[in-house]
Image (spheres, grey):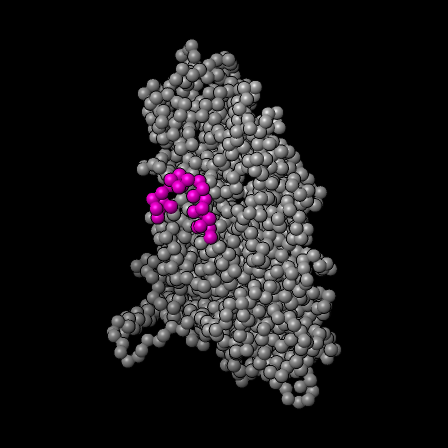
Amino acid sequence: MDTLYISSHPDDFRSLLPLIAAEFCPSPPRIIHEDPPAEVARSRPALVLARSGGTVLTGANAVSWYLAAADNRTGSDKKQESQVWQWLSFAENELMPVACAVTFPLLGIMGVDKKLQQSSKAELLRVLKALDETLVPRTFLVGEGVTLADIAVAVAALLPFKYALEPADRKSLVNVTRWYNTCVNQPQFLKVLGKISLCEKMVPVTPKPSAAVNATATAASEAATPDGTPANGPPKTEAQLKKEAKKREKMEKFQQKKEMEEKKKMQPQTEKKAKLEKKELDVITYNIPTPPGEKKDVLSPLPDSYSPQYVEAAWYSWWEKQGFFKPEYGRKNVSEPNPRGVFMMCIPPPNVTGSLHLGHALTNAIQDCLTRWHRMRGETTLWNPGCDHAGIATQVVVEKKLMRERKMTRHDLGRGNFIQEVWKWKNEKGDRIYHQLKKLGSSLDWDRACFTMDDKLSYAVQEAFIRMHEEGVIYRSKRLVNWSCTLNSAISDIEVDKKELAGRTLLPVPGYKEKVEFGVLVSFSYKVEGSDEEVVVATTRIETMLGDTAVAVHPNDSRYQHLKGKMVVHPFCDRKMPIVLDDFVDMNFGTGNKCFKDKVIFCTIVFLWAVSTIWCRCSGAVKITPAHDHNDYEVGERHKLPFINILDENGLLINVPPPFLGMKRFEARKAVLQALTDLGQFKEVKDNTMVVPVCSRSKDIVEPLLKPQWYVDCREMGKQAADVVRNGELKIIPDHHLKTWFNWMDNIRDWCISRQLWWGHRIPAYFVTVNDPSVKPGEDVDGHYWVSGRSEEEAREKAAKRFNVTADKISLRQDEDVLDTWFSSGIFPFSIFGWPTESEDLRVFYPGTLLETGHDILFFWVARMVMMGLKLTGKLPFKEVYLHAVVRDAHGRKMSKSLGNVIDPLDVITGISLEGLHAQLTDSNLDPPEIEKARQGQKSDYPSGIPECGTDALRFALCAYTSQGRDINLDVNRILGYRHFCNKLWNAVKFAMRTLGEGFVPWEKAQLCGSESVSDRWILSRLSAAVALCDSGFQAYDFPAITTAIYNFWLYELCDVYLESVKPVLSRTDSEGQKQADICRQTLYTCLEVGLRLLSPLMPFVTEELFQRLPRRLAQDSTSSICVTLYPETSEFCWHSEDIDRQMEFVMSVVKTIRSLRADYNLTKTRADCYLQCIDSDTAALVQTYSLQIQTLSYSQAIYPVVGGDSTIPQGCGVAIASDKCTVHLMLKGLIDLEKEVTKLTAKKGELEKQMEKMKEKMAKNDYKEKVPVKVQEGDAEKVSGMEGKQFV
């Protein structure tokens, strides 16, 4: 094991960094809180590598890098590794020094200089502001998870967050605060740091005894002996002892002062009233009476601040009533030719029982953005809504309702009456999810909404079955299915949850009072007939041995060659079972290793039920239960073994000897084990890692059961589905899903479509009984005796023709089962348009354009739509498939009710208190321990509940997160950040509209007049770049590129730069100035109008609200809504200029340098002259051109470009390098205490020289190049280079 020698003062940055990194390490080192032996290393932290011959790594960065790399926390590629290293440097060289400068005086580690402390805090906020901007579009600093970059920067920010950053500071650093809280609440951070309390007020604090002094302050803070002698070092001098005594005296006085303050706090205060806390988020409601469907009032002044409740009121019903979401809008009919094309997409139909969750929210945010974009491009656009009847889920809901309200089962009612009850429930409750989708702003054509049990769709389902049955693609067979004894039905694989067990576990099972044992492996023996030998086998389901019909061994296993052709005897009946030879058996059974019995996982679905029986520890022999195990089924087929079904549909034992007959399956488990023990054939029970298949609907344990069912032959259809992707007819995005697609399609198995339910599409197949002695009676599994028909009369005619008898001799019995819900979903893209009947919609909108959904149903739904579309229509149902990722919580965990991290999108939109979240848990089906665990999870993640974010912010955040190929770690705090973005947008438009004035008339067309200022040309260039990025982003389904382009344009370019830089222009009153101001207003209007149109697909509500307040370019412009206005196109906005962008980039580097200098010298309000020393006349000319912009944005008194040497620059300036072409000289004379600043800079310079000397010493050591990792060496070289490049005055 590696050994980590670490400081005994864990507040030290150098200690915390490797300690937290060690928590991420798969094999953490042993921690020793003392100095390493002198022969090992001279300083801490030091890591001794046991597996590398005692190699020693020293230094926080080197040690942490090694530990973090073990868990891939240093970046997934070279680029990310470089980024991590940059952040390490940032933490150590930029953030940590200023963090210490601010907090050490508060901790009593160094003296308090208020001015110095104020300037230090200003610098700290400047550094953190830069970090805040970086974190706007990100959850973590590098990649999508915690890396060493996050650990280092979070540790460097620890002291400021604990002692210096007050609530107002944190409010201005919303992204840093969100990121910091996410980091320190990771389990690995919590284990080292504990729960962090954030600073409420920046005041001196008394250090705790356990961490009295931060080890980074001084080496002298290490533990000392009572006489003042350091534990490891020479005795202290008299001067040192005096200094320490003085320090102790100061600390005692400080303690007394603190005690007095505490006493005052305890006394009742009557004079002053407590201040009311200011509400962080304004809640403003829209109270103007507006009938549903009527246009919202847009003449009243806009509220002072953005409020989702105000903005989102009334718009949706107006959009719907105006018909904006219908493909007919703006044209006579859908068949009218449209040169811009047709866009059609159908919604993945949510379950009628469903309630909106974040998966729906993500799907609908993406789909609605795409739909609105296509609509704004002028295409004939249809997004077709629909709802799935959800056979099992709906039947369970209604059955529970019946039992709860009327104490009746469905059998008490009968099939017909029960189905009526389901329809009644559907009509009352079934459209709930539609209302939720409207709340999300989904622009669906609700007039075309479909339900999979509607007559139109039911007819299509019936027709599809009959056609495929007549062609032989659908056939009857008796095979193993997933069986839920509670539901009395087969269930699909997607309805089976995998419950992973590490060993012995007691699980609740419906119908059993006591929990049932799983996660154990039971070994027992079978006696070999006619000898004293026995064969030992093992199973996780001991009760299934009652259905064993053979024991299998490998043909090449020498241990069993003599048993070839022999029999073993079943201990509980007279059954003799052959020992069969089969290649699927692993001969390594008996080595003590866990051996996987299932050798045939090549099918489309991993059979979960098989996993529950396949872990064996035996001597290379396997028990075979063909009727209750998928792999054994195939062995039984190969060796023609008997198939003995020992379970009925309710989970009771059948076809077994007494006393087991009639027992419940898990009660038989105990009885069989006891009986084997009594016979002396039980061997052992061991803990066993396994996966238990659980029915997601009933929570019952799923059983493999032999049942006659209807199957779809998928071989040819699967080949076609694979071929259309291979030849490019169907495109799957992102393409890393292609491997999964081909694996499924190339190895597809037949699809069981029978479900033993009442609610659903009853299978239109009839079993034939011929009342004629010349025709022998048929069996249920014989497909020859089954006919399908659109009616009983049609089926009777088919049967009479098949058996060559008259129709009166035919008796029919319709199959009681219904079709798998995925069958009706598989034909959804064309059944919604009335297939097989020809219709205008079917002709125009089928095939569709795009299918967008989550990658988790790629096979269950997407593949089946492709197969059935090709089979029944001869056409692909869509041209492209875009698959988004799975939504996880901020910590990367799967959404789970038991973790308390399942979020209802409506709670994010409207906000909810912590108590409200807790109440939702109380109403759930969780067990009390799970509820408590979930409550703790909610309390940790949402200590103050979830604030009201609004629909627009939620949609924008979901799209910003949707990076192709990655799961989505959704942080609610980041959604709140986008609500603040809405507020910024709101305020910008309000300011701009005041600037435009009431009489403003925009030009008829957005164009350049040739007299634009450099600021105008630059912002129009950036606008054109944003248009291009959005266009390419939508084309490539790159949603983060779209959100980043729009966010950056509005926030960083339009608001932060352009609006600030043109304020002097807009305030001019001379005639020339008025002309320039008019052009500026036209530019501003163009930016507002185009910027809102760019944003509209993502944020439909706030953009509509603001767009309605803008004047139109043409008086006769009839465009009533932004959602049907043309989306900006690159052909119109083609003003992007790389030259102007480069110039402005240079200007902004100068501005930022001036601002940084001003912050260094605490020039918050004072304006100073600024001399810009340029390397050549071209640079000086550029500075002169942009002098007004530089002066305005940097808050300077005046800007003076200077070429060449600094002889013309007056003395008394602070100096900083802006770029390789320009140096900033800021006049400080008369504005600051010069001597004090020189002293401070000299001290800094001295400290820097010491650091350089120390670093060079380290690098000059003989073993440096051999022992120090290359990355660390490169970092050290960068540090030296950076220090040498710094200049001080």
Q: Is residue 426 above or below residue 756?
A: below
Q: Residue at x 46, y 51 (%)?
A: 426
Taking the image as shown, residue 225 lies to the left or right of residue 741, namely: left
Quadrant of the image occupied by residue 1093: bottom right
**Dividing the image into 4 quarters, which one contains the N terminus?**
top left
Taking the image as shown, residue 356 lies to the left or right of residue 924, namely: right
Q: Is residue 169 above or below residue 57?
A: below
Would residue 692 be seen by someone viewing this image from the given angle? no
Q: Is residue 210 above or below residue 1187?
A: above
Q: Residue at x 49, y 58 (%)?
A: 436
> Is 87 or 955 nearer to us in this picture?
955
Would residue 581 be seen by someone viewing this image from the given angle? yes
Q: Which residues are magenta?
A: 402-427
Residue farthest toward the top in the current orientation of the protein: 530
User: Residue 521 magenta-drawn?
Assistant: no
Q: Residue 1268: where, in percent of width, then height?
A: 55, 50
Quadrant of the image occupied by residue 872: top right
Q: Residue 142: where, in percent of width, then height?
A: 55, 56
Q: Residue 552: where, in percent of width, then height?
A: 50, 21
Taking the image as shown, residue 606 lies to the left or right of residue 4, namely: right
**Dividing the image into 4 quarters, which one contains the C terminus?**
bottom right
Q: Residue 484: where, in percent of width, then height?
A: 44, 36
> Is 798 or 1144 nearer to us in this picture?
798
Q: Residue at x 46, y 71 (%)?
A: 285
Q: Residue at x 40, y 15 (%)?
A: 574
Q: How many marks?
A: 0
Decide whether the magenta segment is chiefly helix, strand or loop: helix
